[in-house]
Amino acid sequence: LRVGNVMEVSAPSNVSLREFGCEQSLLSRPDGSASFVQGDTSVMAGVYGPAEVKVSKEIYDRATLEVLVQPKVGLPSVRERSQEQCVRETCEEALLLTLHPRSSLTLVLQVLHDDGSLLSCCLNAACMALMDAGLPMSCLFCGVTCAISADGQIITDPTSAQEKESRALMTFAIDSKERKVMMSSTKGSFSVHELQQCVAVSQRASERIFQFYRDSVRRRYSKSL
């Protein structure tokens, strides 16, 4: 709908997400690991720690968290540094780091394939790996990416092609207790109203992701018992 010169965003009533896939404890060396797949986007995560920390990085009242994002090919660039900061801020909010003072936690995220919504896939892989490591957390979290197309449609979990054609791209980290926004990363031009609609859509989408978390963990432990 176009009102005057302002394009109104139409939020979808039913949120469509690509198929999810997840496997935990894939790697033997990390203390926790998980792979997460959203459509054709896939990320592997490994958590190391709590372990000894370098004196220069030591924090006296909580653990030091380091996040490393490794691209599929080549060396990490500015994009990976930005993703590392977003994931670190979210994990620091969820983890009870004060229970492990003067120690280090390292989260390594290896991108296996990127077909859009990469940051949200990294967040989901990180949460599953932290759960697998058994680290104490105040809540779980998930990532949801929304794109606003040129004609004002909100697309959840967009592919690379949809991201390129969009005029705005937003990724939110949502917590599992109150569905609050823990972190946001935005790119492009949008209004406050469009941002609010994307937050509301992401909160609805998070219900599906948290249900997938529950089903995935339930399946894993029902096999091991």
Image (tube, rainbow, N blue to C red):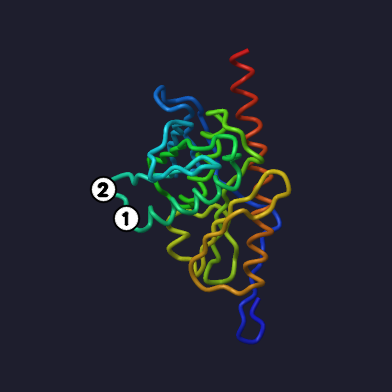
Query: Toward the viewer: 19 or 66?
Result: 66
**Mark carried by residue 77:** 1
Query: Toward the viewer: 221 or 64?
Result: 64
Q: Which residue is mark 2?
A: 74
Residue 50 versus residue 149 in the image, above or below: above
Query: Toward the viewer: 103 or 136?
Result: 103
Residue 154 occupies quadrant: bottom right
For marks 1 and 2, give the CA distance. Answer: 9 Å
Q: Amino acid at mark 2?
A: Gly
Q: Residues within 10 Å of mark 2 (few under 14, many from 20)?
A: few
Asked if the residues shown at circle 1 and circle 2 are in contact, with their CB atoms under 8 angstroms apart, the answer is yes
Q: Position of residue 212 (x, y in %)?
A: 63, 36
Residue 177 versus residue 132 in the image, above or below: below
Secondary structure state at the residue bearing disc 1? loop
Query: Toward the viewer: 196 or 76?
Result: 76
Picture residue at 64% right of the left edge, 80% below the top: 2
**Mark carried by residue 154:** none
Residue most extreme to the bottom: 4
Picture residue at 39% right of the left edge, 41% below the top: 55
Residue most extreme to the right: 178
Picture residue at 66% right of the left edge, 43% below the top: 208
Q: Nearer the viewer, mark 1 or mark 2?
A: 1
Q: Position of residue 46 (x, y in %)?
A: 44, 33
Q: Amino acid at mark 1?
A: Ser
Residue 189 versus residue 62 in the image, above or below: below
Residue 170 versus residue 217 in the image, above or below: below
